Image: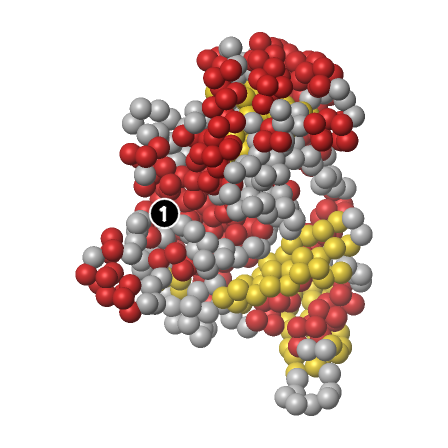
Amino acid sequence: MSDRVIIFDTTLRDGEQSPGATMDLPEKLRIARQLEKLGVDVIEAGFPAASEGDFEAVKAIAQAVENVQVAGLARANLKDVDRAWEAVKLARHPRIHTFIATSPIHMQYKLRKSPDEVVAMAVAAVTRAASYTDNVEFSCEDASRSDWDYLVRVVTAAIDAGATTINLPDTVGFAQPDEYGALIRYVIEHTPNAQKAVFSVHCHDDLGLAVANSLSAVKNGARQVELCLSGIGERAGNASLEEFVMALKLRPEYYGVECSINNEQLYPSCHLLSLIIGRPIPANKAVIGSNAFAHESGIHQDGMLKNRNTYEIMTPQAVGRKSTDIVIGKHSGRNAVRTRLEELGYPLNEEQVDAVFHAMKALADKKAHIHDEDLEALVFSEVYRMRVPDRFHLNNVAVQTSMGSTMPATAAVVLQDRDREVRLAGFGAGPIDAAFNVISQLCGTRAELEKFSITAITGGTDAQGEVTVHLRDGRYTAVGRGSDLDIIVASAKAYIDALNRLEHKEKDVISYKENPTD
């Protein structure tokens, strides 16, 4: 290999701006540690000036990881830059990432600044950032709709002020691959001090071209690419990390570059994100979807039996999927469970292992085989929900409904409200609606259900169902998750989990404000 591409992951910043993808601090730390294990070079941990919660999260991540750079985002103003430095300064490898829009439409209507004023603001912000660290990234927001010669002017000034990375984003997913590659090459070739900086790209997927544009940029000289796990992010999302990486890995002769990613951690990383934000990985998702290695056509199946390479350009194992995953059962011991959890990337302490072990034994009495996905679901229900003591716990739920009857469904719920057990029965349009109605009355909440989804964790008729609910109570939103063999129980657990999360947010008075994109 003749060259190397820096992998900059923005799952915890731009990715978290995806509707419904908000994470709490323990979840962000879990993702950050997994990103380090995955081998990314830079983690953009958040936007410290956006809120106190974002500042604390960036600060915690900066101190938690060791072998990866940690970046904090800042608008091109001195207050934002100072706040970003306060958040990342204790990182072993801190970076400040400052940005300002450079397209005519953004300068005129959003910033209400002249081109000269924008250059001055960029220089001032980069100069302040460079006074703190020599690892400064500057982004020209909406670069793909900016005048090319004006970009050269801004970039030249930013590098002179101390920027060591220059990012030229396709902020609104407008660019086409050949056009975007030409833009990157033009700016690099016409910037007189280009050799002093690494050129980066950050592409959005509004036209489904984010990965293609990122790859085109690499062919034309970009040596940092900003990506998100599973392609989450604003609007249609960001360039997908797993798709971009596997394109480089599978076509080294075409791209002529390498990257630091451990591709066997791609699926575990995306699966972890899916569990945390409650958004299932689509079956047809490239690289990591369940259908990515499924073959139904007879012609395809025949070819596969003769030689896998006829219809698979990569193996499931290459991205971290297991060909067999039935490992644990009701006769398994605690040490076997601990070992398997460590193999799956969950180094738990003794108390946490015990919690998962006992939950696994209870589950094993109800279903024949425990899959890896079952264990991961138990980790989230028994361990990662232990962020702070929850107010509400589900003790029991029972529903009754009659096929073809005009009678409404009924639900009886027993909850633990701190040290007090409460009981109530009520009605609903269906069994889940009835259960939710009763729970909301018991908890005294007026939170609105914005989204409800059910996913089977594994195959088979004895599969656990995983339920995700999105609740809104005024300005607060929360995502709750629950899993169980009984879908009604799983739904009740998810609803209560979301209510507990809302309670924690209201207590902490942490509001995730609208973050600007870059």
Image point (51%, 10%), residue name: 192
Q: Quadrant of residue 312?
A: bottom left
| Residue 267 in the image, given as x and y percentages of width and height | 42, 49
**Circle count:** 1
Image point (55%, 73%), residue name: 486
Report the front residue among 36 and 302.
302
| Residue 217 in the image, given as x and y percentages of width and height | 46, 31
In the picture, measured across the screen, residue 485 lies left or right of residue 436, that is: left
Q: Is residue 152 above or below residue 182?
A: above
Q: Is residue 260 above or below residue 318?
A: above
Image point (50%, 47%), residue name: 230
Q: Is residue 321 visible?
A: yes
Q: Is residue 52 visible?
A: no
Q: Quadrant of residue 218?
A: top left
Hey, which residue is sitting farthest left in the picture? 306
On the rendered image, what quadrant is the N terminus found in? top left
In the picture, measured across the screen, residue 286 lies left or right of residue 327, that is: right
Report the front residue among 117 and 57.
117
Q: Is residue 280 above or below residue 213?
A: below
Dot 1: what SS? helix
Report the front residue among 418 and 80.
80
| Residue 331 in the image, given as x and y percentages of width and height | 35, 66
In the picture, measured across the screen, residue 352 lies left or right of residue 83, that is: left
Q: Quadrant of residue 467?
A: bottom right
Circle 1 sits on which residue?
Answer: 319
